[in-house]
Image (cartoon, rainbow, N blue to C red):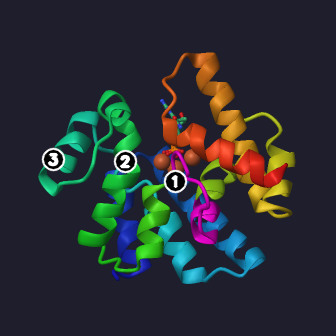
């Protein structure tokens, strides 16, 4: 794997200052959650740092990357290509940043929609993305941040609930993956 510092330098060049601050926030929040739940700190650090490493790409570029590297694209993703930044990011992490650990790659791939029965590392990155200190748009964030450090499954469930509410409100198309993930965690946390 490339050194953390070298990756930071590359991402700082590629991302706008706001996105880069978010990236660093997700890196450290992932590390904090890893401390709390007993995950490997190095894995959390790399997964958090690289989770949005393809976010700066346009929809067209993301689709082109998927075509050229034979990555799957669902109908929903073809219509909303930004949903592919996790999958393309995982590809970049592997091929440009030298990450070989499949757990790190999977946490990057699934950070936007989540998926049922996530690993601890996947849940950590999914949650850190939403609660990192730079985020301020969600309601009840102070409560949700505490919940994340109390019961991460409940936090995942609440984040999905808020995301679905937001998408319904905005008329955004809901990826079946997001819905399936919510159903799974709703049942698990009931
Ligand atoms: O890349 P970030 O902005 O840091 O965070 P992210 O990768 O979790 O993306 C968040 C955005 O993704 C947020 O605006 C909600 C949106 N999103 C999550 N699930 C779905 C979705 N958008 C659509 N259209 N459909 C989904 O199922
Ligand atoms: Fe993202
Ligand atoms: Fe997210
Ligand atoms: Fe993010």
Instruction: Residue at 32% x, 32% y: name it.
Output: 75
Q: Is residue 164 magenta?
A: no
The image's mark for residue 85 is 2
Left or right: residue 29 compared with residue 141: left
Measure how far apart labels 1 and 3 are at the Cα level: 21 Å
Which image quadrant is residue 159 in?
top right
Q: Is residue 136 left or right of residue 117?
A: right
CA gap, disc 2 and disc 3: 14 Å
Q: CA distance from mark 2 to mark 1?
A: 9 Å
Q: Residues within 10 Å of mark 3 (few under 14, many from 20)?
A: few
Residue 23 placement (x, y as % from top left): 51, 57
Q: Residue at x 77, y 75 (%)?
A: 36
Could you tell me which quadrant the N terminus lies in? bottom left
Mark closer to the chain start, 1 or 3 = 3
Residue 111 badge: 1
| CB of mark 2 near ligand 2 (< 8 Å) | yes
Ligand 2 neighbours mark 1 (CB distance < 8 Å): yes
In the structure shown, which secondary structural element does the residue marked by tag 3 occupy? helix
In primary-sequence order, the first of circles 2 and 3 is 3
Q: Which mark is residue 67?
A: 3
User: x, y (%) of residue 9?
Assistant: 36, 67
Q: Nearer the viewer, mark 2 or mark 3?
A: 3
- Which type of secondary structure does the marked residue at label 2 adopt? helix
Residue stretch in magenta: 112-125
Q: In this orientation, which residue lies closer to the viewer: 144 or 123?
A: 123
Q: Is the residue 63 above or below the residue 170 in the image?
A: below
Q: Residues within 10 Å of mark 1 (few under 14, many from 20)?
A: many
């Amino acid at each position: 794997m490339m050194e953390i510092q070298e990756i930071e330098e590359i991402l700082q060049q590629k991302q706008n200052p706001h996105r880069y601050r978010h990236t660093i926030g997700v890196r450290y929040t992932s590390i904090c959650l890893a401390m709390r739940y007993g995950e490997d700190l190095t894995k959390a650090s790399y997964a958090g740092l690289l989770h949005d490493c393809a976010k700066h790409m346009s929809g067209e570029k993301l689709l082109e990357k998927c075509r050229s590297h034979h990555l799957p694209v669902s109908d929903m993703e073809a219509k909303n290509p930004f949903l592919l930044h996790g999958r393309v990011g995982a590809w970049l992490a592997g091929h440009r940043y030298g990450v070989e650990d499949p757990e790190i790659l999977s946490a990057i791939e699934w950070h936007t929609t989540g998926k049922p029965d996530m690993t601890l590392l996947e849940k950590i990155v999914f949650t850190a993305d939403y609660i990192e200190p730079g985020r301020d748009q969600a309601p009840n964030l102070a409560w949700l941040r505490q919940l994340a450090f109390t019961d991460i499954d409940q936090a995942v469930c609440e984040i999905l609930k808020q995301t679905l509410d937001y998408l319904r409100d905005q008329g955004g198309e809901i990826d079946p993956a997001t819905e399936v993930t919510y159903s799974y965690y709703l049942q698990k946390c009931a």
